[in-house]
Amino acid sequence: MRDIHHRQGECLTLSLSKGELVEGEAIRQVRIVSAELRIAVEASDAEVENAIRAAIGAFNRAAVDKPERQRFNVVLRNREGCMKGGLIASVNFDVMLIEDLFIEEAHRRGAHGTKLMAPAEEEGRLRGARRACVSTFSWQARPFYEKLGFRVFGELPYRGGAHVLYWLDKPLCA
């Protein structure tokens, strides 16, 4: 039986043991850490992830009077309203995070990425962001972000150094 709760003081329960299936994936690495607690690697689950995010959000708000993360999208659509690209962003404290940006191949040479970023940055400012941050792999869009004024502040090699994950940021206020 699965009984999912998100309110403080209530329980997120899932009574399974090693080898049992959750949405087609086996539970692995069950470890008993005390008479009352166990740790297990489980399949990705939106309810579990939401409960974790809600709990850490409540903790953060209590610790620093942190507002909720403000999420928004900026979308590129054709005349018929079909999405041809867009970005997912959020403002947390005073930092706007560009979480994902994608433009269909046929529309990548029309400066649409730049045109998506401008209203995203403005929206970030309106929501209190003083900086913007993005991560991108070496085969993705580092030069694009650098042309927009972002600067690399961190690098993490992947696959034995064959690829790199870059973190970039830029100020949003003068």
Image (tube, rainbow, N blue to C red):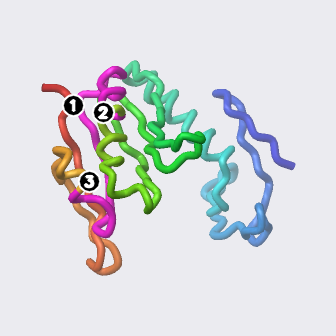
User: Is 141 on the left-hand or right-hand side of 63?
Assistant: left
State which mark lies toward you, 1 or 3.
Answer: 1
- Residue under circle 3? 167
Q: What residue type is labelled 2?
A: Glu
Q: Earlier in the sequence, mark 2 or mark 3?
A: 2
Q: Which quarter of the image is occupied by the C terminus?
A: top left
- Residue under circle 1? 172
Residue 91, located in which quarter of the rendered image?
top left
Q: Which amino acid does label 1 sit on?
A: Leu
Q: Earlier in the sequence, mark 2 or mark 1?
A: 2
Query: What element does badge 2 sit on?
Result: helix
Q: What distance separates the C-alpha of mark 2 from that of mark 1? A: 7 Å
Q: Which amino acid does label 3 sit on?
A: Trp
Q: Could you say which disc has been placed on residue 162 in the image?
A: none
Query: What element does badge 3 sit on?
Result: strand
Q: Where is residue 64 in the image (x, y as percent from the top left)?
A: 37, 22
- Residue under circle 2? 121
The magenta region covers: 120-143
Residue at x 33% of width, y 41% of height: 115
Asked if the residue at tag 1 contacts the one at tag 2, i.e. Cβ–Cβ closer than 8 Å, the answer is yes
State which mark lies toward you, 2 or 3.
Answer: 2
Foreground residue among 37 and 21: 21
Foreground residue among 99 and 111: 111
Asked if the residue at tag 3 contacts the one at tag 2, i.e. Cβ–Cβ closer than 8 Å, the answer is no
Q: What distance separates the C-alpha of mark 2 from that of mark 3? A: 17 Å
Q: What distance separates the C-alpha of mark 1 from that of mark 3? A: 16 Å
